[in-house]
Amino acid sequence: MSSQMKYAVSSYSFSQAMRDGRMNLLDVIPKAKELGYEGVEIRRGSQSDAEMRALAGVLKVQSQEMGLPIIAYMVGADFLKNGLDSEVERLKKEVGIAGIMGGENSKITDDVKTMV
């Protein structure tokens, strides 16, 4: 069994370009392919649930057409601020979005900011 490492990039790597309007989430997969990556992680930004659900289906098709798999879907969570039960229910919906994309992995990160 071969365990050759593959290179992937997170959509977060393009966040500055998305913030200033040079790119949007639908530009990430083609750009990643152009740059030679073999997979992409989609990080949810400020999209509403409805927007992200709609984007998820488009991203899945785009991923399949370009031969660049979505390897993970990353979302933030704050169990302290938002409460355990509330965040768990919200994250269940995020798992549904990951399923639409066909991603095999979901990543949950905390939204705690580092104090400088």
Image (spheres, rainbow, N blue to C red):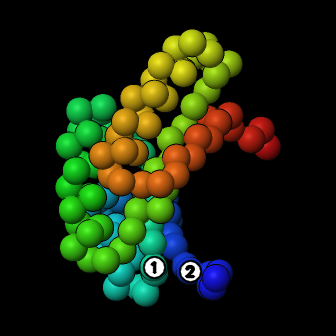
**Badge 2: few (under 14), some or many (20 or more) residues near its Cα, within 10 Å?**
few
Q: CA distance from mark 2 to mark 1?
A: 6 Å
Query: Residue 20 in the image: x percent, y percent?
Result: 34, 59
Q: Nearer the viewer, residue 74 or 15?
A: 74
Query: Residue 78 in the image: x percent, y percent?
Result: 61, 26
Question: Callout 1: helix, strand or loop?
Answer: loop
Residue occupied by mark 2: 6
Query: Residue 23 in the image: x percent, y percent?
Result: 29, 65
**Badge 1: few (under 14), some or many (20 or more) residues near its Cα, within 10 Å?**
some
Is residue 10 in view? yes
76 displayed left or right of 65: right
88 displayed left or right of 27: right
Is residue 21 in view? no
Q: Name the image quarter holding the C terminus.
A: top right
Dot 2 amino acid type: Lys
Residue occupied by mark 1: 38
Question: Callout 2: helix, strand or loop?
Answer: loop
| Quadrant of the image occupied by residue 83 | top right
Q: Name the image quarter holding the N terminus.
A: bottom right
Q: Nearer the viewer, residue 5 or 84?
A: 5
Callout 2 touching callout 1 (CB < 8 Å): yes
Query: Residue 85 in the image: x percent, y percent?
Result: 57, 12
Q: Number of marks in the image?
A: 2
The residue drawn where x is 21% and y is 73% is 65
Dot 1 amino acid type: Glu
Instruction: Please say if 44 is above or below 90.
Output: below
The numbered dot on residue 10 is: none
